[in-house]
Image (cartoon, rainbow, N blue to C red):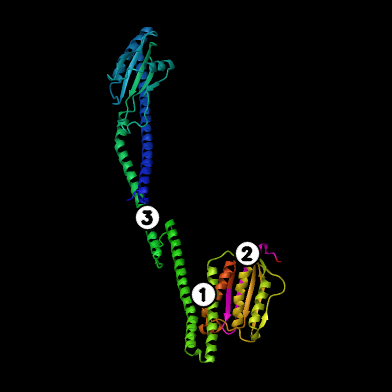
């Protein structure tokens, strides 16, 4: 796998982001777990402190009552009750002590004296925090001294340590002297939980990162397989194979791209087939007059020098065929010019004037047919487009109408307004077009009647050129014909901006 390949880059990026993402989630999760364990430890020490405070108060009250029952009174009773309370406290807290908890008692006999340790549940009970005890006595309420600091990621990389939680509970003794009961809690269970979840959490994080990278690679492999098929198709098209077709599966973006490529391939195939047909038809049409010219040249060589009639007939045929070739070349150049989609001139023009000019030119060419001709009104009717190209298209349609209408028939070219378009309708009473040929009349080199078209000198390019001109001028063209009754072509062209009449 090359470093510069998409798969390699996605692998590196997905690995990096998987580590960052999974690492962040794992760290955040551990942070909240550690914070929860620390809060649980803090709640536990305060719960033990509350229990201890209640137990000490109950013990002091019981002791005072027993001392009073024994007959002690006054200051002596207070001193005896205080002494017995301090003696009984270790016994009270020697049973049922939680393993993680420790207790210690500090007493000050006089106001000027110091707090001295009286008893501790364990030898390692906290003996520090003198300042905390003084604050508890000064405030008359329990005070927490530890832990000194809390690392919220403790145990993630090393052994967990939530510190030592210490609460100082001030005690009111019967003789009025000061005493502080320390509750020490070492969160061993909470630390054990953090130590226990460390390895599974790291393993789950590593597994999640691996799964994320693998899934990304699977998805990328699927995407790249589609891209590879597209590349193979492109290579096949480059090699000239236009019969390929990619499978269109799904509704995702790649499938949309595949559908677009298939449409492109279909368009290229149609264009290639059209070009192939065009070249074949053009070659065939050019070969016919060339063969005729070569045949008459051979006749001239064989008999033209001796027979003036043969000589004249051969020259006339050569002239006729050469003019036929010239017309064909003109039509082919017109087709090429249309395919190149040269920039056209768009302006407002009087389509009625263009129509009258086209009709006049055609009437002059076909004056011997004595046709009845009807044209548009003398008023102006403005259209929008390239007047020269529109005149060329109308000329082709009108010329066909004159050409295929027998003597004594009629040809009409009428114009009218239809909403935001101008309609030009060319109709004749000619021979008509068979119904099966109507869908193909605008194709290049298509001729409804081969022999009749050759008699009239047509190549099947005129209607294709006319349709292309209409299309490039933002118009449409339709045909309706009845065999033996005539043909009608209807052209729709845009009007000037705003629909203004001039």
Query: What residue is drawn where x is 38% and y is 62%?
Result: 235
Q: CA distance from mark 3 to mark 2?
A: 48 Å
Check the image and report above or below for 255 versus 184: below
Crowd class of label 2 (few under 14; some 14 to 19; many from 20; radius 10 Å): few
The residue labelled by disc 1 is 444
Total labels: the figure holds 3
Crowd class of label 3 (few under 14; some 14 to 19; many from 20; radius 10 Å): some
Crowd class of label 1 (few under 14; some 14 to 19; many from 20; radius 10 Å): many
- Disc 3, SS: helix
Estimate the x, y position of residue 150 in percent, counting from the top left. Answer: 37, 27
| Residue 385 part of the magenta segment | no
Estimate the x, y position of residue 86 in percent, counting from the top left. Answer: 32, 14
Badge nearest the viewer, 3 or 2: 2
Badge nearest the viewer, 1 or 3: 1
Check the image and report above or below for 122 versus 6: above
The residue labelled by disc 3 is 224
Estimate the x, y position of residue 271 in percent, counting from the top left. Answer: 47, 69
- Disc 1, SS: loop
Q: Main secondary structure of the magenta part?
A: strand
Q: Where's the C terminus, which quadrant?
A: bottom right
Check the image and report above or below for 165 versus 78: below
Estimate the x, y position of residue 229 in percent, counting from the top left. Answer: 37, 60
Check the image and report above or below for 353 versus 132: below
Q: CA distance from mark 1 to mark 3?
A: 42 Å
Question: In the image shown, does 67 or 357 lie closer to the viewer?
Answer: 357
Query: What residue is drawn where x is 37% and y is 37%?
Result: 29
Residue 346, numbered circle: 2
- Disc 2, SS: loop
Q: CA distance from mark 1 to mark 2?
A: 26 Å
Residue 173 appears in the figure: no
Start-end of magenta stretch = 478-500
């Amino acid at each position: 796998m090359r470093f510069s390949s998409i798969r390699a880059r996605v692998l590196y990026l997905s690995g990096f982001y998987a580590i960052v993402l999974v690492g962040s989630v794992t760290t955040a999760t551990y942070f909240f777990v550690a914070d929860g364990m620390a809060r649980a430890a803090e709640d536990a020490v305060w719960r033990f402190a509350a229990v201890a405070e209640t137990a000490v108060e109950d013990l002091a009250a019981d002791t005072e009552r027993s001392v009073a029952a024994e007959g002690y009174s006054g200051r002596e009773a207070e001193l005896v009750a205080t002494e017995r309370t301090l003696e009984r406290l270790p016994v009270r807290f020697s049973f049922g002590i939680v393993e993680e908890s420790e207790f210690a008692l500090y007493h000050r006999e006089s106001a000027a004296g110091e707090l001295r340790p009286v008893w501790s549940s364990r030898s390692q009970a906290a003996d520090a925090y003198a300042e905390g005890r003084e604050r508890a006595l000064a405030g008359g309420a329990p005070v927490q001294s530890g832990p000194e600091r809390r690392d919220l990621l403790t145990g993630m990389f090393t052994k967990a340590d939530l510190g030592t939680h210490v609460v100082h509970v001030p005690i009111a003794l019967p003789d009025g002297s000061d005493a502080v009961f320390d509750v020490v809690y070492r969160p061993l269970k909470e630390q054990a939980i953090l130590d226990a979840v460390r390895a599974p959490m790291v393993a789950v994080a590593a597994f999640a990162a691996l799964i994320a990278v693998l899934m990304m690679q699977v998805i990328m492999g699927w995407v790249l397989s589609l891209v590879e098929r597209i590349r193979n198709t492109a290579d096949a098209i480059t090699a000239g194979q236009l019969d390929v077709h990619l499978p269109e599966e799904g509704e995702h973006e790649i499938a949309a791209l595949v559908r677009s490529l298939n449409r492109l391939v279909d368009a290229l195939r149609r264009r290639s087939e059209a070009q192939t047909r065009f070249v074949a038809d053009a070659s065939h049409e050019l070969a016919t007059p060339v063969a005729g010219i070569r045949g008459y040249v051979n006749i001239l060589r064989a008999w033209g020098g001796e027979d003036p009639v043969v000589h004249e007939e051969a020259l006339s045929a050569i002239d006729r065929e050469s003019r036929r070739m010239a017309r064909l070349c003109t039509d082919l150049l017109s087709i090429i010019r249309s395919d190149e989609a040269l920039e056209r001139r768009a302006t407002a023009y009087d389509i009625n004037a263009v129509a009258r000019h086209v009709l006049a030119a055609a009437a002059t060419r076909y004056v011997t047919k004595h046709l009845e001709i009807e044209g548009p009104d003398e008023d102006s009717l403005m259209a929008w487009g390239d007047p020269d190209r529109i005149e060329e298209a109308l000329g082709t349609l009108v010329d066909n109408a004159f050409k295929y209408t027998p003597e004594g028939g009629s040809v009409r070219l009428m114009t009218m307004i239809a909403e935001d378009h101008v309609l030009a309708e060319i109709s004749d009473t000619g021979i008509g077009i068979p119904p099966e040929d109507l869908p193909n009349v605008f194709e290049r080199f298509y001729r409804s009647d081969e022999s009749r078209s050759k008699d009239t000198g047509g190549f099947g390019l005129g209607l294709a050129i006319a349709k292309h001109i209409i299309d490039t001028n933002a118009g449409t063209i339709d045909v309706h014909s009845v065999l033996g009754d005539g043909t009608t072509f209807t052209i729709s062209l845009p009007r000037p901006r705003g629909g203004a009449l001039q």
